[in-house]
């Protein structure tokens, strides 16, 4: 074996150094208070409400409390711009949110023995989700700022393992414990976890080099987009972020319904997804992260991409064979392992793409783009599976994985160990005036909004057609514009957010390509009013 180059650690020396890193330990352990609220709001609270006999429609409305995790990008710039006057740029925000979560958790415990307090539970769930999403922004940004490059691979796997453990404690173990100790005491115990978490935050390390915060809120909002879209091959990279997990997302969107229709019992499904799948995705993510250190980020992305695409064939075999428990367990375990393998390498990519100065906003933006296909995959996947059958559907998902691999080839050809994301200055064209920049951005934003409305209406029309009902297009469009229910409000908010982000991204991309270089990295062009 060749000796490592002077000044550079070998793979195993790097792994040993990572294993003794307090930075890595702190970053990983901070995922525990990050995962606790999601398990509580997503799994435990709906279960408790159902046990209390609350109407299923009301339970569904309470699940909308998860919205802050989806829209956290909207207030992430505030955390880049306004660091609190203690504990550095991000730890101050983390410890304050942990204190808020402690108080809210105790408040939830106070109403947990009152079956009629559904409204209070819903409000507390929404407040917990908002505080948790804010904490997540700061925790992710802290990880971006504090970790060294050689620690990224191990950090991704360790963070996921701790995060999933916390979700299991608050979302699964809490339900079991509540059966014999009651929900009030369970919520008190969950809340008390934030006390050692606050101590951990207090002593967590600061970045070795502290990046300066944006000098204005305008820069904090604009700079992350310009900084990202101004780099070489930005469009290909962002397309890859969206497409890399598309095949995987289509498959996992319907894993539960597929297993039900194949005739597997609730116990079988729980063992497959809740036990085998959980263990497999944690192992896969850890291995995927370590692969970036052993073979490099480029090969790790290629390996994870290929394996996660072909892992869907296991479900195709289950669909062809039918009710075969060992085959189903093996297919589920392999598919979740492949998902973790891709997640591990992809998590390292996100850490390296994020600029430390805009760590909160850019990481929130990238993670939102990453999760977008998962959010949108359900309806088209269901329509496709219904049209062509389960076996052919899972075979077809292989095709949907090709675009992501093509985008990967665009900026990380096979054989490139460590991709460089700013290998050349972008080619700038004639700068746009402020009014022209605004006009183009508004047009694109409105077009994205209209397309989102049309997509929502089309899905509603398809559902109505399959149910044998007439569909009134104008009436349905009116419900989106003037919401008549919580679901309509959610659709309107999603449509407006998509339009606004598309318009903002367009403006930032045009500025980055045409004017940003003249003003300095991360600065908005002065012509924009």
Image (tube, rainbow, N blue to C red):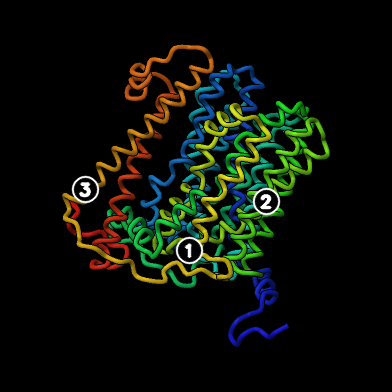
Q: Is residue 273 left or right of residue 485?
A: right
Quickly name the residue at label 1. 411
Mark found first going from the N terminus, 1 or 3: 1
Q: Position of residue 281 (x, y in %)?
A: 69, 49
- Label 1 vs label 3, nearer the camera: 1
Determine whether 169 is above or below 344 in the image: above
Pointer 3 with pointer 2, Cβ within 8 A = no
Q: CA distance from mark 1 to mark 3?
A: 30 Å
Quickly name the residue at label 2. 338
Q: Position of residue 385 (x, y in %)?
A: 61, 31
Quickly name the residue at label 3. 438
Which class describes the residues within 10 Å of circle 2: few (<14), some (14-19), or many (20+)?
A: many
- Label 1 vs label 2, nearer the camera: 1
- The residue depicted at 51 percent of the width and 27 percent of the height is 122
Q: Nearer the viewer, residue 6 or 233?
A: 233
Q: CA distance from mark 3 to mark 2?
A: 43 Å
Q: Secondary structure at mark 2?
A: helix
Question: Does the image show residue 416?
Answer: yes
């Amino acid at each position: 074996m060749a000796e490592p180059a002077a000044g550079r650690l070998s793979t195993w020396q790097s792994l040993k150094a990572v294993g003794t890193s307090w930075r890595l330990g702190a970053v990983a352990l901070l995922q525990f208070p990050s995962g606790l609220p999601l398990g509580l709001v997503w799994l435990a609270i709906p279960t408790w409400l159902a046990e209390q006999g609350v109407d299923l429609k009301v339970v569904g409305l309470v699940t909308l409390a998860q919205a802050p995790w989806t829209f956290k990008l909207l207030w992430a710039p505030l955390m880049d711009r306004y660091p609190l006057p203690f504990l550095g740029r991000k730890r101050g925000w983390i410890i304050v949110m942990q204190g808020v979560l402690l108080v809210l958790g105790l408040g939830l415990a106070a109403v947990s023995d009152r079956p009629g307090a559904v409204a209070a539970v819903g409000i507390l769930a929404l407040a917990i989700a908002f505080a948790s999403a804010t904490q997540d922004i700061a925790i992710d940004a802290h990880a971006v700022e504090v970790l060294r490059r050689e620690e990224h691979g191990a950090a991704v796997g360790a963070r996921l393992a701790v995060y999933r453990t916390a979700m299991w404690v608050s979302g699964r173990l809490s339900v079991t414990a509540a059966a014999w100790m009651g929900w009030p005491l369970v919520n008190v115990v969950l809340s008390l976890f934030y006390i050692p978490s606050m101590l951990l935050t207090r002593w967590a390390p600061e970045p070795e080099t502290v990046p300066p915060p944006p000098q204005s809120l305008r820069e904090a909002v604009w700079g992350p987009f310009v900084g990202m879209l101004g780099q070489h091959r930005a469009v290909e990279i962002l397309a890859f972020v969206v497409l890399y997990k598309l095949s995987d997302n289509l498959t996992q969107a319907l894993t539960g319904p597929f297993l039900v229709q194949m005739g597997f019992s609730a116990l079988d499904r729980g063992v497959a997804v809740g036990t085998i799948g959980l263990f497999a995705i944690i192992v896969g993510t850890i291995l995927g992260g370590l692969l970036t250190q052993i073979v490099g980020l480029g090969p790790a992305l290629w390996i994870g991409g290929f394996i996660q695409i072909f892992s869907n064939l296991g479900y195709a075999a289950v669909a062809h064979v039918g009710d075969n428990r060992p085959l189903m367990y093996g297919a589920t375990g392999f598919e979740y392992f492949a998902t973790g393998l891709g997640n591990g390498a992809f998590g390292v990519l996100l850490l390296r793409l994020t600029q430390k100065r805009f760590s909160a906003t850019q990481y929130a933006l990238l993670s939102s783009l990453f999760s977008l296909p998962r959010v949108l995959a359900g309806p088209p996947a269901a329509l496709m599976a219904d049209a062509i059958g389960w076996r052919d559907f899972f075979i077809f998902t292989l095709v949907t994985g090709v675009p992501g691999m093509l985008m990967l080839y665009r900026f990380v050809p096979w054989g490139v160990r460590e991709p460089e994301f700013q290998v050349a200055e972008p080619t700038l064209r004639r700068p746009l005036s402020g009014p022209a920049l605004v006009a183009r951005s508004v047009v694109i934003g409105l077009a994205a909004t209209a397309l989102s409305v049309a997509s929502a209406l089309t899905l509603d029309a398809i559902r109505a057609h399959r149910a044998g009902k007439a569909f009134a297009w104008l009436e349905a469009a009116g419900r989106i514009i003037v919401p008549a229910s919580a679901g309509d409000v959610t659709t309107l908010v999603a449509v407006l957010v998509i339009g606004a982000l598309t318009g903002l991204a367009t403006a930032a991309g045009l500025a980055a390509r045409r004017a940003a270089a003249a003003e300095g990295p991360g600065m908005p062009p002065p012509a924009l009013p």
